[in-house]
Image (cartoon, grey):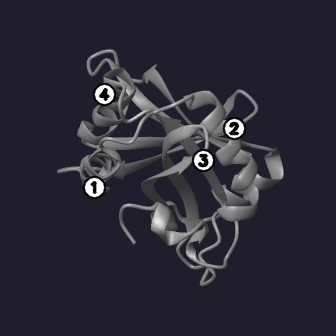
C-alpha cells in the first residue's frame, strides 16, 4: 500500500498536474471504494528533524475514513525534501498552488476511481507549512541529506509512527511538526 505524488496529464487543456496515487492490493482498494468519497479524508502536515547527518524536512500525507473514530490512516506517505534546495521546494509550492487535488485509487496499474479534493486558496495550508519549515530550519546545515533521510526512516518507520491510532500525527514527536 502506498500513497504517491507524481506529475500527470488528465486534461490536455489543463496540462500537467501533480496527482496523488493510492496504490494497493485489491481487497484494500475495494474497502476504500466502499467508503463514501465525501468521508475519505486527505490530511497532511510538514516538519523537520536534525540528526548527526544533518537536516531532513518532510511532508506527511495520509488518507483516513472520517467515520473511524481512532483516526487511523488507511494509507500514508512521507516525502522528504531539502528546504535549502529551491528546486525541491518549488515542487511543493506547485502542489500548494493547485486549486484541486486528484486522488487516484489504483490496484496495480489499473485505476479504479478518482476522488477530487478542493484546495482553493491553499485549503491544506501547504504554503504556510513550507514557510514554517524553511523559517524554523533556517541556518541549520543540510549536511549529508541522503544519510540524514535514511537515519530518520530508521528511527521513525512510517508503518510504526503514522499508521497507528495513538495520535493525530501517529506517534511522531509532535515537536517535529510545524503545526499541531
Label 1 SS: loop
Label 2 SS: helix
| Viewer-side residue, 48 vs 26 | 48
Residue beneath disc 2: 150
The image quadrant that residue 21 belongs to is top right
Label 4 SS: helix
The dot on residue 99 is none
Q: Residues within 10 Å of mark 3 (few under 14, many from 20)?
A: many
Who's the residue at 39% across and 27% down the image? 88
Residue beneath disc 1: 125
Question: Can residue 41 be seen from the camera position used here?
Answer: yes
Question: Can residue 157 be seen from the camera position used here?
Answer: no
Q: Is residue 24 left or right of residue 148?
A: right
Residue beneath disc 3: 77
Who's the residue at 41% across and 30% down the image? 18
Sequence-earlier tag: 1 or 3: 3
Sequence-earlier tag: 4 or 1: 4
Q: Is residue 119 above or below residue 20?
A: below
Q: Is residue 158 above or below residue 167?
A: above
Q: Is residue 121 above or below residue 16?
A: below
Question: Is there CB contact under 8 Å for labels 2 and 3?
Answer: no
- Indicate which label's residue lies in the foreground, 2 or 1: 2
Sequence-earlier tag: 2 or 3: 3
Count of marks, rendered view: 4
- Indicate which label's residue lies in the foreground, 2 or 4: 2
- Indicate which label's residue lies in the foreground, 4 or 1: 4
| Viewer-side residue, 147 vs 68 | 147
Sequence-earlier tag: 3 or 4: 3
Q: CA distance from mark 1 to mark 3?
A: 18 Å
Sequence-earlier tag: 2 or 1: 1
Amino acid at each position: 500500500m502506498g500513497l504517491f505524488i507524481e506529475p500527470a496529464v488528465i486534461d490536455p487543456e489543463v496540462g500537467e498536474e501533480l496527482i496523488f496515487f493510492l496504490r494497493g492490493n485489491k481487497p484494500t482498494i475495494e474497502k476504500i471504494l466502499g467508503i463514501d468519497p465525501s468521508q475519505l479524508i486527505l490530511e497532511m502536515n510538514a516538519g523537520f528533524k536534525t540528526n548527526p547527518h544533518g537536516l531532513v524536512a518532510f511532508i506527511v500525507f495520509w488518507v483516513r475514513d472520517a467515520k473511524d473514530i481512532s483516526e487511523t490512516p488507511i494509507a500514508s506517505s512521507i516525502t522528504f525534501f531539502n528546504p535549502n534546495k529551491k528546486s525541491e521546494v518549488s515542487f511543493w509550492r506547485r502542489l500548494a498552488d493547485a486549486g484541486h487535488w486528484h486522488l487516484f485509487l489504483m490496484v496495480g496499474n489499473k485505476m479504479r476511481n478518482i476522488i477530487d479534493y478542493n484546495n482553493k486558496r491553499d485549503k491544506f495550508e501547504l504554503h504556510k507549512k513550507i514557510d514554517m519549515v524553511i523559517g524554523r530550519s533556517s541556518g541549520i546545515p543540510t549536511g549529508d541529506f541522503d544519510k540524514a533521510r535514511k537515519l530518520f526512516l530508521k528511527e521513525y518507520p512510517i508503518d510504526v509512527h503514522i499508521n497507528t491510532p495513538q495520535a493525530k500525527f501517529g506517534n511522531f514527536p509532535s515537536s517535529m511538526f510545524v503545526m499541531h
